[in-house]
Amino acid sequence: MEEAMQMAKEALENVEVPVGCLLVYNNEVVGKGRNEVNQTKNATRHAEMVAIDQALAWCRRGGWSPGAVLGRAVLFVTVEPCIMCAAALRLVKIPLVVYGCQNERFGGCGSVLDIASADLPNTGRPFQCIPGYRAEEAVEMLKNFYKQENPNAPKSKVRKKECQKS
Ligand SMILES: [Zn+2]
C-alpha cells in the first residue's frame, strides 16, 4: 500500500486525480498504475484500468492465462474504485480489493453504487473489499487535488503543504 500511496503522490504532482494502485499475484506486482486522465486526455485512464492493462500484458509476456492470474490477484488502491472500475474489476474477476478512502463522488463499492457486491449475473463476479487502509492520507491527497484543480489556483500551494508535512 505504501507503493500505491507513492504513485498517488506522483499523480498529484502531475496534476492528476491522486489515485495509485498495484495488482499483486503470488507475491509479485503484475500491474500498477496511477490516474493518467489528463496526460492521455482519455477519461477512462483511471489507475485501475492502467494496472489491469499492465497485468494483461504481463500475462501475455509470460504465457499465463489472464483468468488464472487476475482471478487470484489482489488490488491495492488508495481510493475506493469508481463505478466504471468496479465493473471492470468484476469482469476480470479480481476477487479482493484493499482500498484507502471512500470515493464520495463516483464510488462503486458502496459510496454511490455497490457494484462490488451487487447481484449482476452477467457482469463477471462480485469481489470483496477491505476499506479504510491509510484512508486519512488518501483523502488528504484528494482534498489537495480538488483545491488545485482550479487552473487559477497556484500549484505551489500544494507543494508547500507537502513539504511542511514531511
Ligand atoms: Zn475508476
Image: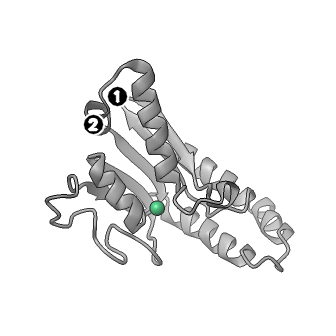
Q: In the image, is residue 20 above or below residue 26?
A: below
Question: Of marks 2 and 1, which one's residue comes earlier in the chain?
Answer: 1
Q: Which residue is mark 1?
A: 26
Q: In the image, is residue 16 above or below residue 10?
A: below
Percent of width and height locating residue 145: 67, 70
Q: Residue at x 27, y 62 (%)?
A: 116
Q: Which residue is mark 2?
A: 72
Counting the numbered discs, the total is 2
- Judged left or right of residue 128, residue 41 is right
Percent of width and height locating residue 147: 71, 78
- Judged left or right of residue 155, residue 39 is left
Q: Is mark 1 within 8 Å of ligand 1?
A: no
Tell me the element at label 1.
loop
Contact, mark 2 vs mark 1 (Cβ under 8 Å): yes
Tell me the element at label 2.
loop
- Judged left or right of residue 30, residue 113 is left
- Judged left or right of residue 161, residue 19 is left
Q: Residues within 10 Å of mark 1 (few under 14, many from 20)?
A: few
Q: Residue at x 46, y 31 (%)?
A: 57
Residue type at mark 2 is Arg
Residue type at mark 1 is Asn
Percent of width and height locating residue 10: 69, 51
Name the residue nearer the viewer: 146 or 159: 146
Q: Residue at x 79, y 76 (%)?
A: 151
